[in-house]
Structures are given as C-alpha cells and as structure tokens.
Image: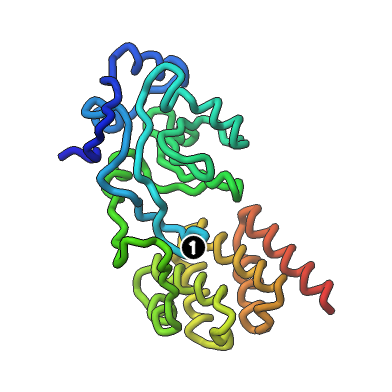
Amino acid sequence: MSIWEKDSDKPSRLTQKNIELAEKTFGVTLPQSYLKVLKKQNGGYLKTDAVHVDFVNDDGEGFILLDSLYGIEPSEGILETEYLKEEWGITKDNIILIAGDGHSFIALDYERNPSSPEVVYIDTERGDAHKICDDFDSLMDLMFTVEDDDEEHDDIHIPTHEEIRAWASSTNINEVANGVYMWIQNFSMEKEDNLLYNAFDKVFDEGTEQQKITIADAMRTEIENETITNQTLIDLCLTLLRKEVGLDFKIYKEMIEENLADKR
C-alpha cells in the first residue's frame, strides 16, 4: 500500500545514479525501506499528516506533524541537508534531513549506528533533538492522520481538569507524562495533590529521558514565573533531578535552586 497522497505534480523518478550520489555525498548506506518508498514516488505529500512520539511537543501533544517526505535529486531533497543545516543553525552531525519546513525537521541519524540510522525530530526554534524511533520502518508504523472535528483549525481543544487528571492516573506512561506536563502548566489546577506527586514520580521512574527533561523544563519555567509555589512539588522535583546523571537534569536543578535562592 502506498503512503503517498495523489499529487497533480509528480516528481521525477528515483534513479540508481541519484541514490549512489546521495550515499557517496553522505558516506552512508540509505535505508532500504526509505528507498523502497521513494521508488514508488520520489518525494511529495503523504496520505497521513502526523507521527506518534513518546515526548510532548510545545502544544502538549504526543505527536508531531509530518505530511511530506523529501526525495533524492541533485541539489534537491535530502541533498539539501548541508544547506538547510547551515540556514537553520542545526549543529547535529551525522544526519540526513528527510522532511521539514525550517521550524522543525525529521532526520535519519547515523550517530549511534552507521549502518542503521535512527529517526529523530529536530526543533530548530528550541535548538534540541528528540529520538522518534529506531528506524524508518518504525516511522511508517507511527504515521497517522490527525482527526479534526471541524474543517477550521482555529478550534483548539483545551483539556479539562478531569481529562488531565485521567491522563495522570493512566497506566500508559506516555499519557501520564502528558498529564503531568499539562497539569504543571495549567495555572488553575491545584498543585497540592497526591495524584500529581505520584504521577510526577512515575514519569521519573518509568518515563523516557526526553519526557523527564520536558517536565523538568516546564517546572523551571513555572517556578520562574511564580505560577508554581507549592513547596512539596518543588522539593519532589529537585529530589528526582538529583538522582539523574544527565547534564540537562543538572542544569535544570541548578536553575531552579538559583531561582529559589534569589526569591528568598
């Protein structure tokens, strides 16, 4: 089954010459599953428009938008990777950009495994990168179409307190992480709540590194803005951050501690 949307403007067919040019340019072997897709259509719009991820984006959603893929042409598609990296200030090495609009990109990341690249999401506005999945095959499995109740995209659903509490109490760690993130940022929700404490602890016990970093960053922001003053929650956050070994956790812990010290 094809993943491509039917376009009026068909790209030129993928040639073996251009595959070899790309692989020589990047010094890698491109995933066969990616090439198989491009042999049906050499780039363009997809039938789907989003990808499930295990981190939360700026909208608090557990997905990112992806409605097209680059093809392979000389100086076009993935062969624009170096130009796009320079244009958008991307410093990450060993990647090939396969989709994106400038504000964010999807890339094959060869850093961990030169023969089997992971797929990553690069947010150029925040300057960070998140792993999406282990390979291109897995990326296709994660693709889906966002359901819109209305044709207009102006109607943004704001989750109720009950929905956020339901996520926080879920057995699905992705929903728990989403619930904690939304709860932290919802100024009208009471922060002195054992459900929030337990969900927070659960994310740091079972969640991915990126989920923990996202929540730590949200805590830092809300503490700086003085929208979170609950000392129990702050102490819990600092205790959990002290147990983590990554540099990001150390930085967020120090920023929170410095901010609290300045307010004394």
Residue extending farthest to the top is 17
Q: Could you classify mark 1 by the number of other residues whose Cα lies within 10 Å: few (under 14), some (14-19), or many (20 or more)?
A: few
Q: Residue at x 49, y 32 (%)?
A: 95
The three-letter amino acid code for the residue at tag 1 is: Asp
Q: Residue at x 59, y 36 (%)?
A: 88
Residue 231 vertical position relative to residue 175 in the rendered view, above or below: below
Q: Residue at x 42, y 16 (%)?
A: 74
| Residue 32 falls in image quadrant | top left
Q: Is residue 211 left or right of residue 65?
A: right
Residue extending farthest to the left is 1
Toward the viewer: 200 or 136?
136
| Residue 254 falls in image quadrant | bottom right
| Residue 2 image offset from top left, x and y in percent | 19, 38
Residue 98 vertical position relative to residue 50 in the rendered view, above or below: above
Residue 217 vertical position relative to residue 143 in the rendered view, above or below: below
Q: Quadrant of the C terminus?
A: bottom right
| Residue 76 image offset from top left, x and y in percent | 43, 23
User: How many marks can you see?
Assistant: 1
Q: How is the image coloured?
A: rainbow
| Residue 256 falls in image quadrant | bottom right
Which residue is denoted by mark 1 in the rendering? 59
Toward the viewer: 17 or 132?
17
**Label 1 secondary element:** loop
Residue 33 vertical position relative to residue 127 in the rendered view, above or below: above
Q: Is residue 89 left or right of residue 150?
A: right
Q: Quadrant of the N terminus?
A: top left
